[in-house]
Amino acid sequence: MSAKMSAVGTDLLNWDELLPIYLRTYRAAFTQDEIDGVIKFYKSPAGRAYVNKLPVVMQSLMGEMQGFMKTIQDKMMVIQKESAQELKDLKEKEDAKK
């Protein structure tokens, strides 16, 4: 199964299949002047620095986001436990009325 699924991905995720999608999307979003400006940027020292440093930035960002998401998950877990207790208490009150 794994080999078959990998083959599907390899067959479909190739440049011949993806190029028309990228062309349609970029043509719909950008003018030729904008694309020329982007190309000029990437050829500039700042653009080359951006390309070279982006993997490190993304790795750092992912590390930062993991800590951030942990905080959110912890707070959501507290809310979930509180809500579960509230529902339990409510059910007990309703059962006591019967």
Image: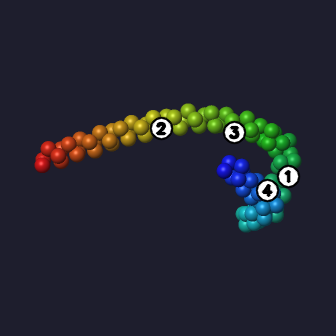
Give the distance between the C-alpha atoms of the residues marked 4 and 1, in whole angstroms: 27 Å
Question: Which residue sits at x=28%, y=44%?
Answer: 87
Question: Which residue sits at x=14%, y=44%?
Answer: 96
Residue of label 4: 14
Q: Earlier in the sequence, mark 3 or mark 2?
A: 3
Is label 3 in a helix, a strand or a loop?
helix
| Residue 73 position in % (x across, y down) | 47, 38
Type of the residue with mark 4: Asn
Give the distance between the C-alpha atoms of the residues marked 4 and 2, in whole angstroms: 37 Å
**CB atoms of marks 2 and 1 within 8 Å:** no
Residue of label 2: 73
Residue of label 1: 40
* Viewer-side label of 4, 3: 4
**Mark 2 Cα shell of 10 Å, populated few (<14), some (14-19), many (≥20):** few
* Viewer-side label of 3, 2: 2
Residue of label 3: 58
Q: Earlier in the sequence, mark 4 or mark 2?
A: 4
Type of the residue with mark 3: Met
Q: Foreground: 35 or 58?
A: 58
Give the distance between the C-alpha atoms of the residues marked 3 and 1, in whole angstroms: 23 Å
Question: Which residue sits at x=74%, y=38%?
Answer: 55
